Image: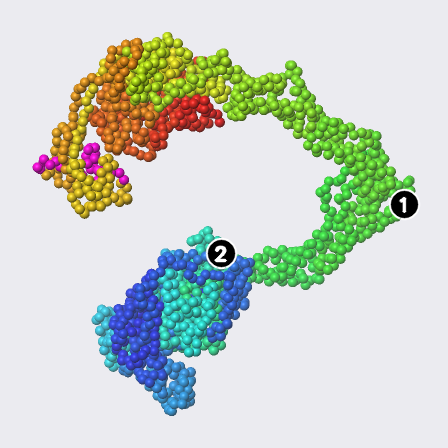
Amino acid sequence: MHASPTPRGTPARRGRSPRASTNSPGASAMPVDIPNRPSTTFTSCLSIAVEGTTPIERPDAAAPSASTGEASQSYPSESKRAPRKSKTDAIAALHNHAQSNSDDAPDSVTEEGAVRINLRDGPPIRVTPFLDLTTVKTPDRSLNIPNATDRPFGLTDCPVFHPTPEQWKDPLGYIRSISDNAKKYGMCKIVPPAGWDMPFVTDTERFRFKTRLQCLNSIEASSRAKVNFLEQLYRYHKQQGNSRVTVPTINHKPLDLWSLRKEVQKLGGYDAVTRNKKWADLGRLLGYTGIPGLSTQMKNSYARVILPYELYRERVRNSPTLSPKKQGDPQLKTHAPGKAVKPTTGEDDVSEPSSPLTATSSPLSEPPEEASGRPRRNTRQSSLEHPGPRRATAANDDNLPFARSAASQADKDGNPELHCEVCLKKDRGEEMLLCDGCDCGFHMFCLDPPLNTIPKGQWFCHTCLMGTGGDFGFDEGEEHSLASFQARDREFRRLWFKSHRPASQLESDGDVKMTKKPDPNDPTVNVLDDVVVTETDVENEFWRLVQSQQETVEVEYGADVHSTTHGSGMPTLETHPLDPYSKDPWNLNNIPILSDSLLRYIKSDISGMTVPWTYVGMVFSTFCWHNEDHYTYSINYMHWGETKTWYSIPGDDAEKFEAAIRREAPDLFEVQPDLLFQLVTLMNPSRLKETGVDVYSCNQRAGEFVITFPKAYHAGFNHGFNFNEAVNFALSDWLPFGLDCVKRYQEHRKLAVFSHDELLITITQQNHSIQTALWLNDSLQEMMVREMRIRDKARSLQMGEVLEGMDRAEDQCQCTKCKVFCYLSQITCTCTTKVVCIDHIDDLCKCDPKSRILRKRFEDAELQEIQVKVSERAAVPGAWRAKLNKILTETARPSLRSLRAVLAEGDRINFHLPELHSLRKCVARANEWVDAANAFLVRKPSRKRPRKIRGPRSSSDSANGMNIIDDAPDRPEHSLDDLYAVLKEVENLGFDCQEIGFLRNLAKESEETKAKARVLLNTTPSPRDRDAYIQECDRLLLHGLSLNVLVEELLEVEKIVLREQLLKDLDEDLDESNGVLLEHVRGWVARARQCDLPPDNPFMKRLDRLLRLGDEWERRVKDLLTKPQRTIEQLEEFAHPGSGIPMNPDLLDRLLDARARAKDYEKQAKLWLSPEASTIKPKVQDAVKLVARADKDFNIPAVSDLKRTVDFAMDLETRCDAVLKHRYQHTDEGDIFQTMLQWRKYAKEHLTMFTLPNFERLDKQLSAHFRWLESLPWFCRQHQEVHAHNLMEDVIESTRPEDDLPPNDEYFTCICTTPVRPPAQGTVSDAVQCDHCFARFHGVCAANGGSCPFCDHHHWNGTIHKERNWHFCYLPTILLHAPEVTKNYSEEWKQLEIVVHRVDRLAGVIGQFLSFASQPANQRAEYIPQVRHYMRKLYKIQFAVSPNPEVSFGLDLAGLHRILAGQPVPVRIKKRRRPKFVFGQDVDPDWRDNTRCICRGRTSYLLNYPTVQCEVCEKLYHAGCVFFPVDSASGVRRFMCPLCCIRKNRSYPFSEVRVKYGESPDPDVYVNTKEMLQNFSKEMIYMKLPPPYTQTLFVELIRFTPGVPENSGGRRSPPAGQPVEEMLPRGLPLTNGSSSQAPHPRAPHPPVPHAHHHSHRSAPVPPPNPYENGKPIGIADPSSSRHVPPPPPWSNQIWSNAGATAPPPGARVHQDARSPHITSPHVGHTPPQSAAPRKRKYPDDVPPHTPDERLGPGFSPGPPKRRQASDTPQPAATTPRSNQGLSPSLAMMLSPGPNDIRTPPQSRAAPPSYSSRPIAPNALPAGASSRMVDDRLPRSHPHASPHAQPHTSPHVPHQNVRKLVYTEVHTDRAGEFGHGGHGSPPDDYRSIPPMHPRR
C-alpha cells in the first residue's frame, strides 16, 4: 500500500515547484543574465481547465504581484505563495548550466525561471456528473498477458500467481503458502480466478476527492539535493555581501558546483584533494579533458565559491553557542527552517519530530470527527509537522534595504515577547535580528562570528541557511469528481504524447515510423489520437521526466482518500448487506479482520491500515519509496483503469537500500533524518542496482491484486486514470518485523500507529489456541524480559509503584521524548502529567528520582502467569511427541491400547501434528484387523427367521435333535482358510493385542473338529448302529456351530442327518389318498435337493410327479382368475379338479367365492326381468349398479339382457328429466307433444318392471296440458285443435305500441283503418255519415250492425253478436294456470302470452286516457280522434277488454265519444306575435366575395378575408368582422351570426352586439331588442349604455314590425280534428254521405307526428327540435286548455278523481326523432307568454315553464325542458314500484305469495303505471303460482339515437316502449326477446321465438 506525503504546515512552508517562479515578488531584486531563448520548460496539468473542479483555498497564500518578465497568468488552483528567492536563483543557475554549449552563456546565477507551457486554451472541458465505467478498462480474465521483456533498467518482474477456486476460498492461507517464494521479491501479483468479479459500488456522482501536485523532477533525491545546495550557497554569499554569485566557467562551460562538491567530499575534502593533488583527476571526472591549468581552475573555483560556505557550516557545527546539540540529540534535527517559535506553556509543547496524533497523513479526505474508531496515525510525515504561520511582512521583505530588527518588528506586531535563540534573553531588542526564514530572534553579538551592523537585504539564521529544503512536500491540487479527473488525465495524456512521441515510434531522423495497428482489446497499449503508446513507452517517459532538469512536469494524484468518509469501492455489510461480495474474504474491508490476521486484535479501526484507503491516479502520478507502517503486509486491488507500475525491494535488502539513498543525497538526510517516512523521494532503480540492491517490478492492471511483504520498500507510478484500494494485514510471521519497526520508530522519535505490546497482550486474552501460542511464545518472552529489565531498573532507583487496572488513552501512554508506547509501564511524576520511558527518565522533570512513580498496567505475577500459560500451550505438541516416541522406542510391537490412547490425546490437541496422520493410519489399520478377528471370535445373532420344514413332523424329531440344523443362515461366514489368512496378516502389522492369542486357539480347535468329521464320513454304519451314528453326527454338528468357523467336512455330515430326517417324514406324511397340499410338496422337494437325495429314490420320483400336477393346476386357475370376465361354466370346471392333484387352498377359496357371486348376480337379473305380481319394482339406478358390478368380473347372459332393458329405461328417464327441466332439444319432425305420447305408449308396454319417477311426472303434466288446451276460448272441439291465426293477426295489428296516437289524416273517420276519402271525379261514393258525430264510414263497414260503432253502445254491450265473445280479464288466469311443460314447449301458450301482454298494454293506455277524460274539464272535442283511434283497435279485437268482467272499455269509449261529439264548437284563440326587425345587412346586396357582413362591404382590404357561414340564415361573414376564431385549436365549430342571435333573443358568444336605430339622436341610446322580444312589444324600447369596454359590434336597425302582446277573440271553428261539415245537426242513424260530403279543410290544431318515434302508453313525448333549418315548428300552447295532474303510480281508483288524471297522448307535442338526447326526467312548465311558436336551434333555447296550480306535482302539460345535448347517456333514477299501478288482471298474478322470490327487472327503466281498480285478494285462484314482471323493449326506431336514455317518470316520453312480460323467476335468463331484450314482437306471430327460453 502506498500513500502520498502529508503537507507539513501551511503551503508557505512547503518546497515550491517552479510553477510560480515568474510571479516571484522578489524576482527583480536579483540581477540576472540569461539568454533570450529559454532552455527549461514548466508544464502543469492544471493548465487544462475542466468543469467540476474546485480550487483549494489556502488561507496563507500571498497575493501575486506582477512579474518583470512576461505577463502573469493565473491558473485555477495555482498556489499564491511566492517561492523563495534563493531557490529560484539556484534553479536559474541550473538553467545556465544546461546551456553550456552557448557561446554567450552567462557566468552568474540569475533568477529567471522556466517557460510555462500552456497545454490547452479555450473553455473548460465539459464532463458528466457521473463516471461512465464503459470508458475505463475493467477486469478481463480471458486475456493472458505475458510479462514485459523490454523493461527499463533490465529489471526482473515479480512472480504472478493464479490461485484455483479452491485455493481462493482462504486468502491468508493462500498468501501464507506463497510467501516463502514471493517474499524474496518484496511483492507479488495475484490474478483472481475466472468468475470472481468484485463489483464497484462507489457513487461516482457524489464521490469527490482532493489531490496532491507532484513536480516529477523535484522528487528524485539527487535533483532535490542539488537544488537545496545551490539555494544554501546563494543565501550564504548574499548574506556575506556578495549580491551577485559568479559561477566559474571552464572552457566556456559553467562548472557544476553540486557535482564538484560531491566529488571533493568523496575524495576526503578540500585539504585531502589539495594534499594529494587530485584536482586534475577530479576535473576529468567532471568531463573536462585537455584543458591547460585545469587543476588550478578547479581548485580556485572551489576555494572561491564553495569552500567559504563549507567552513561556515563547520564553524556552526563546532560552535558552543550555535550548535544544535544543546537542544537535543545531535543526530536529530531540532530547529526547522520556516518554523515560527510559538509561545509555550511548558516543555510538553516542544516535541521533535512530528506527532501523528495531531495531524493525519492526508487531509485530502479527512474522516468526520464523529466517526467511530481512531484515524490512521500515519508515520509517513515530516519532522516539520506544524510550522507556524509566517508573518505577513516576512513574505514580502525580499526588497528591504536592511534586515529586520526585533525592535522594529515589535513595533509592527505589538509583540514585545521576542527573545534571543542563543542566550534566551529578551533584552536589547534594537540589537536583535529577526530571521526571514523562521522569524526567530538573535542578538548580533551572540552570533558566531558576531555582527556589528544590521545586514542589508534578507538575513537567515544558521539553522534556516543550512536547513533549506527540509520542508519539502507536495502542494495541494484541486478537488475533483471522478469524471473531471478522468477528463483532465485523458486530455493531458493526449496532448503530451502528441507533442512527445515515444522514441520507439520515431526514426533516427525524427520521422514517425509506420506501426501496425494495435489490438483494441490489448490493455498494454493505448491509442491517443494517432499515437500508439505502450506500457514501456510510458515507463521510459516517466523516468526521463523524473531525471530531466529542463522539463518540469506537474501532475495531480488523489492518494489516501479515506473510505470511511467517501466509501469503499467494495460493498460492505453496512452499505450493501445483500451483496454476496460484502462477505467475500478477498474484500479489502474484510481482510484485516480475518481470523488469521493479527490486526483484528487492534481494539479500534485505523484508517488506511485496518480500514481501506482509495487512490485515484493520473498519468505520471507517483508514490515514492516507502515501506508499510509497522512493516506490515499490504494488499492493493485495482478496480479499473490504466496500468500501475510497481517497484519493490525485498525486506532483506532494506538496510542496503537505506544506505544507498543516504549516500546519494546525504544533505537531505542531514536536514530530514526521517526522510524515508515522508514518501517524497525517488531514486532511480538503475542507481540502486549499481549499489547491489535487488529491485523488481510488475505492472498491475484492472482486477489484479498486488501484495507487499513485511519491511519491503516499494514505489511506483500510474500510466493513466485508475482507481485502486489498499489495506494492511499481518500474519503470524510478521511479529519480529513489527518489533524491529517499533525500535526504529523509537530511534527516529516517530510515533507508532499502535502499541506492539498491547497487541501481544490482546492476543493472549482473546486467542487461547495452541497454534497461536507457538508463534506468540517467543515474542511474549522477549516482551517479558524487556519489561522486567525496565521494572528492575526503575526499582533500583527506589521509585514508587502504582497499579492501574484499566487502559489509559493512547496519548497518555507515550514517551514524551521518543514517542514510544509505554503500555505495560510508564514513569511519571506528581509534578507533571507527562510520561517517559526508562531511557528518558532524566528528561521527565527535575524532581528527586525517588518521587517519581512507576505506573504499571499489570503486576509482575500477572504477566508471568500470562507467559506461563502461553508457554504451556506452546509446549503441548512437544510433550505429545515425546510420549509417542517413548511408546515406539520401548518395544518393537507396542500395545494397541497405548497407541489408541496417544491418538486420542493427539486428537484433543487443537493443533496440526504431522505425526498424527501416520499414527492415525496405523491405529486404523490395527482396528480393521481386530474387527476381522472378532468376526471369528464373536458370533453375531442372526436376524433372519429360521425356515420351517414343510410337511408334517413326527413327535420324535425333538428327541432325536433333528431340528438343530434347520436354520441354514446360521452357518459361519468364514472358513478355516480365512482364519489362517488373518493370523498371517497380523505378523506384518507390528502391534500386539489379546485377539491374536484367541485366534490361534480357535484355529487349533477347528483342526480337531475337522479330523473328527473325516472319521465319521469314512465310517459306514450297519442298520443296527444307524441311530447311534446319527446321534454322533448331531453332537459333532452342535460342537461345530460353537466354533464360528466354516469346516467343509461338517457340511457333508449335515447332509447325512438331513437325508435321514427327510426319509422319515416322507414315510409318515406322504399319503396321496387323503390329499396333499401343494405347499407341502414344494417343501419336501426343497429339502430333498438340499440333502442331495438321489433322483432314483422312490420318494423323489413321487414328489416330482405331484409337483408337476400341482403346478399345472395352479397355473390354469391363476389364468382364469386374471381374465376380465369369467363364465359360470368355467368356474364350475376348476372348482372340482379331481383327487391326487395337490392344490393351493388360498387359490381354491378365491375360485369358490367368485362362483358364488356369479350365481347371485344371475338370480337377481332373472328376478327383475320376470317379476312377480307382488314384487316391489326396483329403481333403474339399482339395476344399473347391479349390471356394473356383474360386468366387472363375469359374463352372464341374464345380466346382459337386463343391461339392454336398463339402457332403454335410463334413456327414457333422461329424456323426461330434460323435458321437465326445460333442457330438451326437440330434433324430430312433428309436434313434441306427439313424441311424448309415443314415449308414454312404449313405457307402459315395455318398462313396467321399473320405477320411473321422471316419466310419471311427465305423464301427469301431459294430461294437464291437453286439459289446458281445451280451456282456451279459441279451442275448436270439433277439430280438437286451437284456431288462433286470425286472432293473433288482429291482436298484433291493434296493439302496436307505435300506433297509440291517431293518424293525422282528417279522412280517418271510419271504424276501420282505411281513410274515407272523397271519390274521384265522376264516381259515386258508398260512404255513409253519422248524424250525431258526423263520422263517415265505408259502406261495407257501416253494414255491420247498421249503426255508428262510435255512438251506438249496442256494438259494445254484447247485443250485436261477435265471434269472440269472451272477456280479456280471464285470459291471464288461463295463462297462469298452464302446466310447466305447456309453458316450456307449447306454441299455444306462447300465443296466449303474446295476446295477454299486448292487450294488457293497450288496456293500460286506454284506461289512463279514460281516467283523464272522465273529468269534465278534460272532455274536449279535440280528443275525438284519439277516442275513435282506441275504438278502432277494440273493434278489431272483438272481445271485451277491461280490468274485470264488469267493465268494458269499448262501452266507456262509446259513451265518452257521445259526450265529446255533442259539445259546441270552441272559439278560436288568436296567438301572440313577436316583433320583427329588418337590419341594414338585410337590405344590402351581396358584396364581391358573396358576403353580407357587419362591415357592409365598406372596407376594401377585407376582400377575400377568411369567412364563416351562419347556420341559420346561411349568410357569409368575415371571421374577423364578427370576432369568430378561425384557428382549429379553439374548438369552435358552430356559428350563428349576430343578427340571428338578436332575432332569437340569444347572446352572441364572441362579442357584445348593440343595435342602433337611425331616428335616435343620442349616440349612447340603443334599442333594447331583448325586452321587446320578451314582452311582444308593439313599440320601440330604448336603453342607454356606457361606452364599450370590450369587443363590440354595432348593427343598424332599418325597419321595425310591432308585435301582438295580447290574445283576441275570433270566430267559432269546428272541433279540432273535425271538418266544418260535422257541425251539422247530428243523429244516430247513418245517412248516405254522397250528398253531404265536401272537401275537408286542414285541422286547426297542429298535426301530431308519430311515424318516427315510439310513445310509451300515455306518457308525453319531448318537444320537437325547436330550430330546424331556420323555420318555426308549431308548439301546442299548454295555456289553451285546462289540465289536471295525472294519477300517481300508487292510485287504486279508476276515473273517479279529477285531480289524478292525465291528458291523452294526442294532447301533447311529440318528440322529434332528431332530438335523441333529451333524457332528463325533471321538466318545468312553460309560462303563457313564451308559448308562442318560435324557431329554436340550440338545446338551451327552450322557454321555461310555469306550473299550473290545478295540476298535480307530477304532471307536465307542456314540453319538457331540453338538456344540453351529450353523447354520454345519463343514468335515469329508478324507484321501486308496487303492483297497484299495473292493470287489474295482471296485478292479481303479481301479488306476492308467502314464498315469492323476486329478482330485479332486467330492463333499464320501469314502465309507467296507469290507474286501475283494486282487486280483492281472493280474486287470485287457488294454486296459482307467483309471478314477476319483466320489462321488454320494443324494436328501436331506425332514427333513434343509441345513446338515448330511458325515463322513469310517467310524464316524460321514452325512447323505447316497454312491455310487461310474465315469467317465472329464473336467475339464469338472459336479455332475449321477452326478457329484457330490445326487439319488439314481430308482426307474424308464427315466427315468434319462445317467450320462456330455458338454458
Farthest top residue?
Answer: 1359
**Residue for point 30% across, 25% down:** 1649
From the viewer's perspective, tell me whether residue 913 is left or right of residue 1321.
right
Residue 1541 falls inside the magenta stretch: yes
Mark 1 sits on what residue? Answer: 1020
Secondary structure mostly seen in magenta is loop
Secondary structure of residue under mark 1: loop
Please name the amino acid that badge 1 sits on: Thr
Farthest left residue?
Answer: 1561
Please name the amino acid that badge 2 sits on: Asp
Picture layout, residue 1483 above or below residue 600: above
Secondary structure of residue under mark 2: loop
Q: CA distance from mark 1 to mark 2?
A: 85 Å
Which region shows up in magenta? Answer: 1533-1562
Q: How many marks?
A: 2
Mark 2 sits on what residue? Answer: 584
Picture layout, residue 834 above or below residue 27: above
Mark nearer the viewer, 1 or 2: 2
Q: Which mark is residue 1671?
A: none
Picture layout, residue 1063 above or below residue 513: above
